[in-house]
Amino acid sequence: MRELSVVIPVMNEEGNIRPLLDAVRSALQGMDYEVILVDDGSADQTKQQVLIHADERTLLVELRKNYGQSNAMTAGIDHAGGKYIALLDGDLQNDPADIPAMLALLQKEDWDVVAGNRKNRKDGFFLRRIPSRIANALIRRLTGVYIRDYGCTLKVFKKEIAAELGLYGELHRFIPVLAKIQGARITQVDVRHHPRVHGRSKYGLNRSFKVMSDLILMIFMRRYMQKPMHLFGPVGFTSFGLGVLINLYLLFLKLTGHEIGGKPLLVLGLILLLGGIQLITIGIVADINMRTYYESQDKKTYTVRRVYKGKGEYPPS
């Protein structure tokens, strides 16, 4: 097993391949590493450039079409043979020279994830940095995972954490949250950031809407993945209870001779009553699905960091 696998998703980065590989080789000189480039449906000469400049440490994983960065990362991690995994962007804005220090910190202080924080970010202020700051603050507040820069791809993991991230859709922006769900210990360090020289950025303001959609999922997974009834139950019972009270009040009015047919309160009572029943039902179904998810795959609802027997670690590392 190699010590380190560097996973780099690339799409239409033909101009960056040679300097990227040169930078990685220079930064990791003397280390036992491999580079896994995942071609995520490039329409230019990215694949050809990789094959031209590849060496015995380079692995190219070519996907059939563009599946998105999260799926490309998953493909790279699945093909990685290293004890540790480093994620790196293919646009040369992240600096591979930061990887050795991040790996040393991971090993020395027994972190599970070391995340990069772009200290002097070289992106547009209004279209990139301002939306990013707002999104970072919102994610920190709502998920309780306090990472300064969620958008920095440069991260170093222990293999077992990276392999269980479950990167679907476009959840790569929430890697620290996914890792935290596994109980990972996460720290962050300042890293260098360079302006893009070749190619075009794949990011724009439209990603803000995707981030908001994925954030709702992350909040659910972080807080209620193993107890969905704790989310739907209280809301459902509150709605059901209010509906019952309103309808009992309206029943009392009807029995005392008052007309209730045209009252908006009747509609509200019925909506609350039916909505409460639906939410409670959704909670029960979600709870059953959660149990099916774990039990059908023999998954545990917990993760074990280490086991000690007597004075030593068991089994010995």
Image (spheres, rainbow, N blue to C red):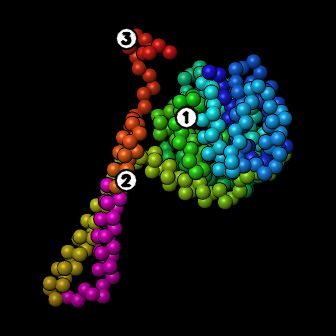
Is 73 rendered above or below residue 25?
below
Residue 163's tag is: 1
Label 3: few (<14), some (14–19) or many (≥20) C-alpha neighbours in 10 Å: few
Please name the residue shown 54% across and 23% down the image. 110
Q: Quadrant of residue 36?
A: top right
Asked if the residues shown at circle 1 and circle 2 are in contact, with their CB atoms under 8 angstroms apart, the answer is: no
Residue 52: tell me if it is visible.
yes
Mark 2 or 3: the one toward you: 2
Disc 2 designates what residue?
Answer: 286
The magenta segment is 258-284
Main secondary structure found in the magenta portion: helix
Asked if the residues shown at circle 2 and circle 3 are in contact, with their CB atoms under 8 angstroms apart, the answer is: no
Q: Quadrant of residue 309?
A: top left
Q: Nearer the viewer, residue 182 or 250?
A: 182
What distance separates the C-alpha of mark 2 from that of mark 3? Answer: 42 Å
Mark 1 or 3: the one toward you: 1
Disc 3 designates what residue?
Answer: 310
Label 1: few (<14), some (14–19) or many (≥20) C-alpha neighbours in 10 Å: some
What distance separates the C-alpha of mark 1 from that of mark 2? Answer: 25 Å
Q: Nearer the viewer, residue 288 or 30?
A: 288
Q: Position of residue 222 (x, y in %)?
A: 46, 45
Quadrant location of the N terminus in the rendered image: top right
